Image (spheres, grey):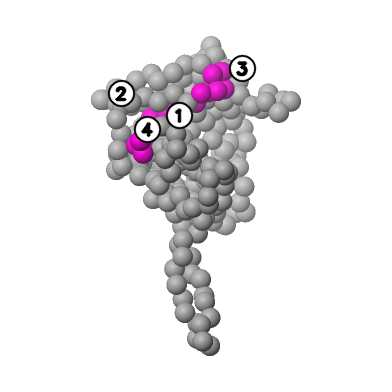
Amino acid sequence: MNLASVAVAGLVAVSSVPVATPGGYHHLGAGTSGEWSGVSGRLSVVDVSVRPNTYDFVASRFMAKRDMGAGRISWLEVGWAETGWSGAGKQRVYTFNTNTNAWQFYDQYPIKPGDKVWVDLHTDSDGVWQAWLFWNNKWNLLTREKLPVGRSARIEQYVEVHADAKKPVVRIDVPRVTVDNVQLKPADGGPARYWREDVATLTGTAPGQQMRRGGFCLDWVTRYDTWTAGDC
């Protein structure tokens, strides 16, 4: 919410008005500038206000990707999402990869607001990237893809908001999502380590500046393994 001042009969009245979400993509998070062979962490689940029968979506996710050149990027992502085109307003575990260019939902793992889900995205020496979900006290394989990424890639952690630009402008509310315990798996096969300030990291904001995108804000609790993002 922001404050709008309205002059009425020589007086100034202050009212609260919602900030509309601009159409398109809004990314809150960070990416590595170097390459790693995996990432894992915990994502809190919240109820967002995407519109039914639209291409609105909100996702909290990890991604491994590589720029293949000529405008082509190869990636695999895993997390949870709420979408306007399916799911009836529910939050669902999902993956997306550029081999199939399709969202895949995993409704056998029902999640709800207030839950916290652990996910893992990594590759072994064979270069096959795998997405896993910790559920029922064990790790469960969601998908595995032989991407042209190779045995290491740049890693992202984001809360991603997309507002359908072909629909009237509205506010998409995103209660604060918490991402924590984020660890990176080194490309050389060493033990996983927390994503901290000594990891070369790209945020798109100046040091000490709060990240703001499309009316949403990110606050780092511990750079870069614990943070929150959502409505400002």
Q: Which mark is residue 108?
A: 2
Measured Cα–Cα span from mark 4 to mark 3: 31 Å
Instruction: Determine whether the residue tagged by mark 3 lies in a helix, strand or loop.
Output: loop
Q: Which mark is residue 148?
A: 3
Q: Quadrant of residue 226?
A: top left
Q: Which residue is mark 1?
A: 78
Q: Nearer the viewer, mark 3 or mark 2?
A: 2
Give the magenta part as a residue range: 88-102
Q: Which residue is mark 4?
A: 87
Q: Nearer the viewer, mark 1 or mark 2?
A: 2
Q: Amino acid at mark 4?
A: Gly
Q: Residues within 10 Å of mark 1 (few under 14, many from 20)?
A: many
Measured Cα–Cα span from mark 3 to mark 2: 29 Å
Q: Is 70 placed above or below 201 here? A: above
Q: Amino acid at mark 1?
A: Val
Magenta residue check for 99: yes
Q: Which mark is residue 153?
A: none
Q: Is residue 8 left or right of residue 49?
A: right
Residue found 51% across the figure and 16% down from its top: 145
Q: Residues within 10 Å of mark 4 (few under 14, many from 20)?
A: some
For the residues labelled 4 and 3, say whether their Cβ atoms are less than 8 Å apart.
Answer: no
Measured Cα–Cα span from mark 2 to mark 4: 13 Å
Front residue of 117/101: it is 101
Measured Cα–Cα span from mark 1 to mark 3: 18 Å
